[in-house]
Image (cartoon, rainbow, N blue to C red):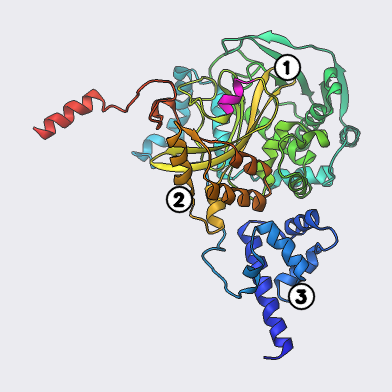
Amino acid sequence: MSTQSSLIRKAHFLGTKIKSLRKRNNLTLEDLSARCVHIDTEAAPSVSYLSMIENGKRVPSERLIRIIAEIFQKDLTWFYDEVLDKESIRPSTKTTAVERMPLEPGFLFSENLLQLAIPELLAQTGTTGRQFAHLLIRAHQESNQNQFPDLERAANSIGKKQFPLRVNDLFSIAKSLGLVIRWFDRSSFKDKGSTNEPLNILVRSFFQAPNVIHLNRCLMKNPARLKFDLANNIAHKVLHDGDGARATQVSGGRGLDRRHDRESPNMDAKDVLFAWRDFECSYFAAALLGPKSAFRQFLARHSYGIDIGKKVDLTTALVMRRMSSVSPYPHWHYFDAYPPGNLRAVYRGNGIPLPWGNMTMLSDPCQHWAVFRMLNTRSTKPSAQISVLESGGEKHLYCCQSIQSKDAAGNPHVLCAGIDLAPALTAQGIDASDVISQIAIACEKNGGAGQIPNEVQQQLVSISKILNIGWIETGAKNDATIICPRSSACPREKHCLGEAMHKRTPQIEQVRNAIIDN
């Protein structure tokens, strides 16, 4: 074989393998180029040169192969063996948290009957219109995997993908849209709302049609929160022409209860409209302050640290919520929890169950969920946790990082971002069920929490480096723990509430079964 043909063959296999690795891990050419820059600025390839390598038009240097090997945790020999394992390099299938079920008889679920029945259902169960609207919006988010390109494009057209934006930049954008800023002075106040303990409520901002943004002067002390409220109200002008049909922006209090402009517990059309507009404007604001490509590279440079927002004056909540929209890894979840158990924001793109009953009431919680444990600590440092959860007869493996924070009104709450680790393991050709089983056994031997076996720990550290999410490695070095959807279904030998609780067959079923047996 001639030297030229040997070189072409070498370039083909190297390029194909690099492209397969990149695709398997859902990275764009820009992502891989940026990851290379973080490791070795001098040897990192440009996007165009990387494209030529993948297409077999250039042969990468050994120095560059070493960089790519470090990113994807591969031995150098793997790149030269000229073997393509199609099974191991196949991209993992994306999952959704929304489960569908057939509802029969179908005519009972017609649009007209549902519109008649839903208000009565909400009134009888004590569920407010805003709570129901947020359930609908969350299902919409999860079915779309938190991807809303129309809102991204609208934000990009206004912010021109500039990152980071300063406070003055946002004031300039507001002025260019004909918006007028008016300041007001109001401190927080106490309101019990739907909780047992009074919460602080702070009116942060509101929009007055057609073009006035009212901002609380206390936001000037916190540029990150001021930027978000400015962006949020700019969104209303861009998306809805500033018609004023949206809720006042507040921190604390009755966040997901009834609208602040009405006291009736019944639902009306505005409940859904206002909740949807809140979501739209919030998503637009996050996209404006963190344009997808630039923010994705920002997260990569800092290994997805959840407290990096302070570097660019962004709130921790925005950083963590934005992760699920911009990350190349699609299997995320996110919780924003207030004590004793009020979930203000939820995203379950990987199908993880809720850590407790519903959006406002603490109901039968598993005390070992990271978000629940953080509610009962005074630490303000981020905490990483690897968890094994058994649900529906299957075991799942999650890693999350949680941090306790305070909202603009001074109320403590916990922010938690996490991922499903099983798809990441599978994508690298690792038997996820075996890994989960080994961790579960280690936990069970130690009463529900235990050290991760060394071999498995190394696999998780490797996944941490491939995904470039630093807190996976941190979590892998901590004890893993068993969690469950509800404490009443605790799989531990010693129940987490200190009781021996076992599932019992309902008495009516016992009678029925006895009759059949006889």
Check if residue 46 falls in the magenta segment: no
Q: Which residue is mark 1?
A: 410
Q: How many neighbours does mark 2 have within 10 angstroms: few (below 14), some (14-19), or many (20 or more)?
A: few
Q: Which residue is mark 3?
A: 58
Looking at numbered disc 3 in the image, what kind of residue is underneath it? Arg
Residue 269 versus residue 263 in the image, above or below = below
The N terminus sits in image quarter: bottom right
- In-front residue for pair 84/454: 454
What span is colored magenta in the figure? 371-377
- Indicate left or right for 358 with 40 as reference: left
Looking at numbered disc 1 in the image, what kind of residue is underneath it? Gly
Q: Alpha-carbon distance for marks 1 and 2? A: 44 Å
* Residue 384 point in image, percent of width and height: 62, 35
Q: Which residue is mark 2?
A: 434
Q: How many neighbours does mark 1 have within 10 angstroms: few (below 14), some (14-19), or many (20 or more)?
A: some
Residues under numbered marks 1 and 2 in contact, where contact means CB atoms less than 8 Å apart: no
In the image, which is nearer the foreground, mark 3 or mark 2?
2
Q: Secondary structure at mark 1?
A: loop
